[in-house]
Amino acid sequence: MNSKNNSTQSKINLSHERNPGLELDLDLIHNIRINRSAVERRAQTSGKRRSIKKDWQAAWLLKAISCIDLTTLAGDDTPGRVKRLCEKAKHPVRRDILNSLGMDYNQFHTGAVCVYHNFIETALASLHGTNIPVAVVSTGFPAGQISYDQKIEEIGASVALGASEIDIVISRQLVLTGKWTELYNEVSAFRKACGPAHLKTILATGELGTYTNVAKASVVCMMAGADFIKTSTGKESVNATPPVSLVMIRAIRDYFDSTGYKVGFKPAGGIGKAKQSLEWLILMKEELGNDWLSPSLFRFGASSLLGDIERQLEHFISGRYSASYRHPMG
Amino acid sequence: MSIKDIYKTMDYGSAPENHSMADQWLDGFNRNFGLFINGQWVSPESRSTFESINPATENVIAQISESGQADIDAAVKAARNAQPKWQEIGYHQRAKYLYAIARQIQKHARLFAVLETMDNGKPIRESRDIDIPLVARHFYHHAGWAQIMDSELKGYKPVGVVGQIIPWNFPLLMLSWKVAPALAMGNTVVLKPAEFTSLTALLFADICKNIGIPDGVVNIVTGGGKAGQMIVEHPDINKIAFTGSTEVGRIIRRLTAGTGKKISLELGGKSPYIVFDDADIDSAVEGLVDAIWFNQGQVCCAGSRLLVQEGVADRFLRKLKNRMSKLRVGDPLDKSTDIGAIVARVQLDTISQLVQQGEDDGCNLWQPEFKAPPKGYYYPPTIFTDVSPSSTIAQEEIFGPVLVTMTFRTPSEAVALANNTRFGLAASVWSENINLALDVAPKIKAGTVWINCTNMFDAASGFGGYRESGFGREGGKEGLYEYCKPVNLSYKKPISRLSKSDNQTNLNSNKTTMDVTPKLFIGGKQVRPDGGYSYPVLSFKNDQIVEVGEGNRKDIRNAVEAAHKAESWTTTSAHNRAQVLYFIAENLSIRSEEFANRLCLMTGATNDQALEEVQASIDCIFRYAAYADKYDGNVHATPMRNVTLAMPEALGIMGIVCPNDNPLIGFISAVMPSIAMGNRVIVIPSQDHPLSATDFYQVLNTSDLPGGVVNIVTGKQDELANVLAKHDDVDGLWYFGSEKGCETVEYESAGNMKRTWVNHGGSIDWMTDYHQRSELYLRKATQVKNIWIPYGE
């Protein structure tokens, strides 16, 4: 396989080389085989094969927070709301709790914040002086039903404003009709439009029909130069599930095995519980390894997850079950 | 390690399961267990005990009683006394008790799981998520069978007292597989757990006591092989159910030969795990974890022989080794452990020796980095590549976490390699091509075939072996027949008379009424007997009618070879077989009078009686022609998104030793159901009256029956039966003769674990039996294969 894009420098510090993408290999796409029942069995039992308790659980939950793309993507978002979210991203856990856990209050933050284009400047201003990246959803998020030109323009505009991560939605119709070349071309163009900003491709797996489609779309996106592949917009009726994640994670592993390039993974939507976040981390560790247990290669797209983890962490310290009002709002 | 450090390393840490409840239960018995007989805890007469050891720590957990003869006698007596009442309390009452057991197991699920792990060494994840839930499910499912036995098993009654001997790899699960169907069908049980793992059986006894199962219905006797042998040999036990090694199974078959005891044996395996190049490779890799690194590989149906298509072998093995490196070996009570402790030192030694043998044979060993805990019996996940079928490790069951790998080129080579074993317990087939998967599944000689999955079990599906993996099924409706028998099965008084011709080796050919010598019928042709001898056939007046060929062991050999070649009969459609049977019936019908006359001449039957026998024979053939495409299996309702097909398959090559009396209907009754189901048979017809069979050559030859499907060898029945019993390419053997002959047939069949069916010396009313018990004949002529097909895109 030959790399396609020239490696571009990002504002984000990476321990790995950015995926430059490859020429499209249609044979590889056509040979993808996914057995749904077997995938579901593995996904269902994976979390039960490992148990993380006590200090380890606390450490892992902190890791989960560090991988959260703290997100607000709502019609009623306002600058005030976004500012508050950014403050929470900077200080996701109460100072006393972090101190008890031996973590540095000023150095511990979420993986990113994720907002609509309109709030990029607000977010950048709020996060000034931190190294928390601003991610922005793009290309007609969530349905992607705008023209190709508009999509390219939207990416360009967001990058110009300073967004360092662009979460694009792919055209589901290209997957559902098997137009892999067209999908490849589209995502390649998105990647180009991103320039130094990182490209996170949202597959909207809940709308792709089959795991085989998910696997094929994952591989096409990686070949087209995706830095991350992401399950969902959070707006589909079914969002991130363990089996769909497993399919994508295995695609990432195969891509790494054959090219040496590491692509990140972002499950989004429907992950609201601390225990779920551990299950996802276990899946990453088991299927991909520790390199993927860091925000440079793993993110949760989540809004309510943080609150549950905060309560768990307080319980870990005090032995008392916590209440949500005891933790500052985001 | 600080939280900040863990945050960097992202290790798992330890997650031990609390075992205080299990300790509390053990302490409640002062860690010293008696036997559970007649609803009471009793001390063994010998007062001797042995230690139960936790293989993960090598600590002694408890003292277990060693049963002696007096104890086994007491248990059998208790079971015997309890049985009539247990049968009489009725279907619904039995169902209620079984439900109560299931509920108790669920209520105490974690206690059972922890105790199982402490005693056996299996990871708590497995005992908690797999073993114990399956146990509860097994009792729930069979509570249902108890309830509907009256309608679903009409005409069947309990066997009586059942002796059950179970292994150490799935202690409570195997108990449930044995006890649930036995109790459901109205039997009482004497069960002996394996000496390494008695504890969950004793906890089970405790819950039986608590819910008030009537005294004597469940008896748990602990001990070693000697106690097991006492159960096997006990004269008042009606059936033995055993799960364990093929070696011990063979001993049990021999010990029970001729006793009339019903037996079911679930034995060893060397199950193939076949990966085609169009499989979901990652899922197939993960499947292997469940196949061979489940329960430390101590699984009779473990997918221990990886057969991978050559083109994907390198990629597959690379992924597999990567996956193996992630397996965590260690404390089985830790919730993050994948591979726990081997059950005992002796088993660990066996594994090590076989692995050494593999290396000595030049096979290529690979193990991931492995650090065993300081105490306990641990063995790392292990894979051998560069293995050939001739390597010891490719043939012997290792019963440990050791996988051997071979490659294949084509589907037919995969099948050939898969079947290149004396075992036949299970197989896995991985392919995303349904045409390929469903083509391969029926060709594999195994009782269970898992397509794109492995080690799936459920109470609704039968489990059991082909070949030397044993016989009988556990689970599903097919499993129930092991624990009940036909109500109308009553043999007449035993046959003990000698055949007339046994005493006639001299050629006192006074007058021969026919100047032809019927030969043998092998491969569709009449052939002279190899030995060149004949023996006289006498009329009922003791006149010599004719001489027939006297077959010997070489004729049997030739007949088996002919049968072997006629494989297309087994694979042809049931419709086609039915057509041939109808044709046979018609051709016999045309010659009714001739066959009747022959019967009169040989047996002295009146003309009416003879015509009646011929008519019954024609009716019988029609009956099995009709059944040929109707005895066709089930789809089991296993609780998954899955189709579980239970297919009755032909045994393969069968020997049939016909009754000496009723020379025509006896012959027809046995041969027709066998060939209707697709078997190829070697028939030893009535010794004194063989002419009904030899006359039948022409009927067969004019009925489009392919050569080799029915082979007929006349001669001394018991001698030839002995040869058939010792022939390892014969899969099943029916024998309807003397008590002594039955014993020989059962004893010698242990060599390759043939499925046998004998009359235990009793005589059968052949004129009605085919009609009353036709399904029994069909069942005996087949074995059920369960094919699991999960689906979903």
Image (cartoon, grey):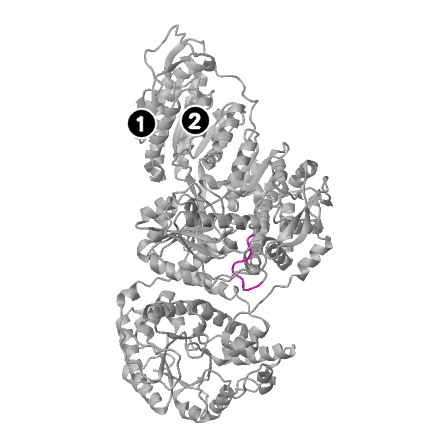
Real-space Cα distance between discs 1 and 2? 21 Å
Q: Give the side of residue A65 with respect to residue B199, left or right.
A: left
Read off the chain for label 1. Answer: B
Q: Earlier in the sequence, mark 1 or mark 2?
A: 1
Q: Amino acid at mark 2?
A: Val
Q: Which residue is mark 1?
A: B524
At 30% across and 87% down in the image, what residue appears?
A153
Q: Quadrant of the N terminus of chain B?
A: bottom right
Q: Which residue is mark 2?
A: B723
Neighbours of disc 2 within 10 Å: few (<14), some (14-19), many (20+): many
Q: Give the side of residue B146 with respect to residue B687, left or right.
A: right
The location of residue A95, given as percent across then percent down, is 58, 87
Q: Give the side of residue B202 with respect to residue B754, left or right.
A: right
Above or below B165: residue B740: above
Viewer-nearest residue: A257 or B482: A257
Which contiguous range is marked in magenta?
B334-342
The answer to whether residue A273 is visible is no
